[in-house]
Image (cartoon, coloured by chain):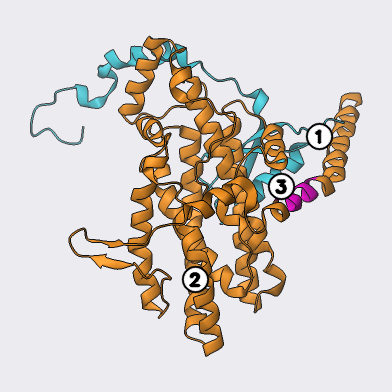
Amino acid sequence: MNANWPLWEVFVRAKNGLAHKHAGSVHAADARMAIEAARDVYTRRMEGVSLWVVPSSAIVASDPKETTDLFAPAEDKVYRHPTFYTIPGGVKNI
Amino acid sequence: MYTTELKDKNQKSAAVSLADEDPEKLAAFEARVAADDFIEPKDWMPEAYRKTLVRQISQHAHSEIVGMLPEGNWITRAPNLRRKAILLAKVQDEGGHGLYLYAAAETLGTSREEMIEALHSGKAKYSTIFNYPTLTWADIGAIGWLVDGAAIMNQVPLQRTSYGPYARAMVRICKEESFHQRQGYEIMCVLAAGTPEQKRMAQDALDRWWWPSLMMFGPPDDKSPNTAQSVRWRIKRETNDELRQRFVDVTVPQAEAIGLRVPDPALHWNEARGSYDFGDIDWEEFYAVVRGEGPVARERTQARVKAWEDGAWVREAAAAHASKRAMKMAAE
């Protein structure tokens, strides 16, 4: 019997109205056990009201080598930010 | 809790393996680290950086886990329910800290099993401080105050260590650690203000834990060959001696405030430096404890191995349950 439990990524919702945020990971045999371990490891001080656990193997991540291709093009598109535009002085509410 | 950076027997010197690295990648990496950028798991990193981190983070994790033992020793004998609840919570925190750190080390490609096996076989080190016994209740006060105090001193700069998962684990740990120190100091305050016997007990605990706490910061800088490389890579942000000095400077007034005496005849305030001068540390004792000759070193490892072996049926049952349910779900 392989007792090498799979790894799960833990996401915690700090309070309703906020998104779940990555907190860390735990090893567990199944999803229920992962929830219980995540509760003990990541919410001992009322850090959350809801947990997600996701098998780490199910996460697809971008490759750091693609960082330039993926994110650099946004750098020369400053017109996507409101501060790019000049508005006459004295004009309000815009 | 914290561990000093201790060398494994088979550790190669960082300089040797650095020569094998692609110089262009190495330069880019060093520039990123020098600019205080964080390195994340999938980023390129020199092998020596990876190895140093695995060693340091896993030693740190082992120290948290082994650190549960000296305090666990007193849970059933805490003097009242309040103290018992606090101690339980603290020991549970240490277990949690171990888990955050194991998870951080796993992102570097080493498995949990490998790390646990290294701890049990004695190949991996943990902080020398946990190889001293907890003889009286005052030791629980002294550990919280001094050992966790030294840990905080070490860990606060590690929140900005260059490896992202390690830094994030340290942020969580530091948030939880200050409760540990304060509960310990409070135990000492109560004992120091108690009966003459209680005060003696507090003084005795300080006498026994003071020097081992100073040793927790690791060998002096001139005997710590890895420090320069670790500081350069922002794995470590301050040297052993700098941190040790800061610990002495903040802790001595805390002892004085409750009428306890630091067991060092050479200790005195140096006006010119704005720091305390203190006596020589017995490094022979330190290296003996590193070699596994600490008073309760064998007991500690045996207790860990026993816990692991006694828990085997639970791990097997959980795995059997999970695979049975998975099969049932597949059949439905």
Q: Estimate how packed mark 3 is, as few (under 14), some (14 to 19) or many (20 or more) residues with alpha carbons within 10 Å.
A: few
Q: Position of residue A6 (x, y in %)?
A: 73, 31
Q: How far apart are marks 3 and 2 (CA)?
A: 42 Å
In orange, which chain? B
Image colour for chain A is cyan
Circle 3 or circle 1, nearest the eye? 1
Q: Quadrant of the C terminus of chain B?
A: top right
The image's mark for residue B207 is 2
The subunit letter for the residue under badge 3 reads A
- Classify mark 1: helix, strand or loop: loop
- Which residue is pictured at 39% across the width and 58% down the height? B280
Give the magenta-colored segment's residue range. Answer: B301-308
In-front residue for pair B135/B86: B135
- Classify mark 2: helix, strand or loop: helix
- Classify mark 3: helix, strand or loop: helix
Residue B304 part of the magenta segment: yes
